Image (cartoon, rainbow, N blue to C red):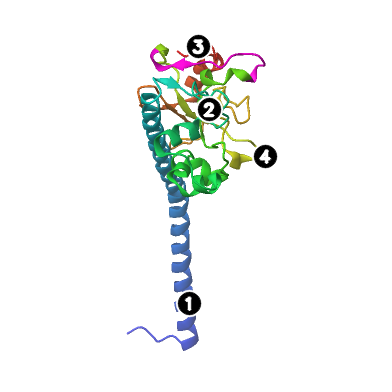
Amino acid sequence: MPPKLPSDARCQAASGFTLIELLAVVAIIAVLAAILVPVAGRMRSAALTTASTNNLRQIHSLFTAYLGENNNVFPTALGSTAEDPAARYHWRRVIWEKTNGPFAGGVTAAMASSNYAKIMWCPLMVKKHGAEQHPWGRGSYAINFFFIDPTWRAGDPIRVLNREELKGRKEPLIMTGTVLKNSPKFGTWEAVQSAKFPYDTEWMNLNYAYGSAQNQALGLFLDGHVETISKERGAELDPLLRDNTNFE
């Protein structure tokens, strides 16, 4: 039988053993955290990217319904239409109200409390920057620069765009856009004007913040499918996007 240790020695041995165990557990937890936190972050980003992709598909459904009731004629980015050439609601509000009816009462509050806020605002961008509703129809998604209202150049007539005349295959119709540096809650501009990276515009650029590595953009095409767009492909798309006289 081993000799009995004095009570103080037994306590010190027990304390030392417990401390070693505790340090080992802390070290294991630290290692697991270092592994799991980035993985959890990538999983959250991937989930929000999926949610944003679903938003784009729902926007395509809204466009399809809008075009079906408007002889296949698109609204401009600022919302001018053949029916209402003086309109200044953004295209988001135009296509939303065509299907769901006009916002009743306070427009800003109605937007915030309806599915408009869920569909027209990207959940990933809202998580990062928040969202500030506006009666014009702010959001996170922007239309192709081809649809920019030409009245931004004094004297130009409003362009009437017919779906049957568009042969766009290379360029997305709707894209997630960058935000204003000093006012990110405003969302993106109504039309994407550039796909360069590093960004050469502030809130008119294709936003590379998606995918598990948060380095891709999202684009909705005329036929309704959604694609991720790499920075390299964005550089190839840039001259096409900048040309608002053509939609390839």
For the residues carrying marks 1 and 4, which lies nearer the camera in this image?
A: 4
Cα separation between marks 1 and 2 = 73 Å
Residue receiving disc 1: 15
User: Which SS does the magenta portion mostly show?
Assistant: loop
Under circle 1, the secondary element is: helix
Q: Which element type, helix, strand or loop, lies under badge 2?
A: loop
> Where, by quadrant of the figure, is residue 167 drawn?
top left
Indicate the amino acid at tag 2.
Gly
Estimate the x, y position of residue 119 in percent, counting from the top left.
44, 40
Question: Is 131 above or below relative to 61?
Answer: below
Write down the residue under mark 2. Answer: 79
Q: Which dot, 2 or 4, sits closer to the camera?
A: 2
Whether residues under marks 3 and 2 lie with C-beta atoms below 8 angstroms apart, the answer is no
* Amino acid type of the residue tagged 1 in the rendering: Ser
User: Mark 2 packing: few (<14 Cα in 10 Å), some, or many (20+)?
Assistant: many
The residue indicated by pointer 4 is 182
Q: Using residue 60 as the reference point, say whether residue 16 is left or right of it.
A: right
Type of amino acid under label 4: Asn
Q: Residue 34: give x, y in percent of width and height.
A: 47, 50
Q: x, y (%) of residue 124?
A: 48, 42
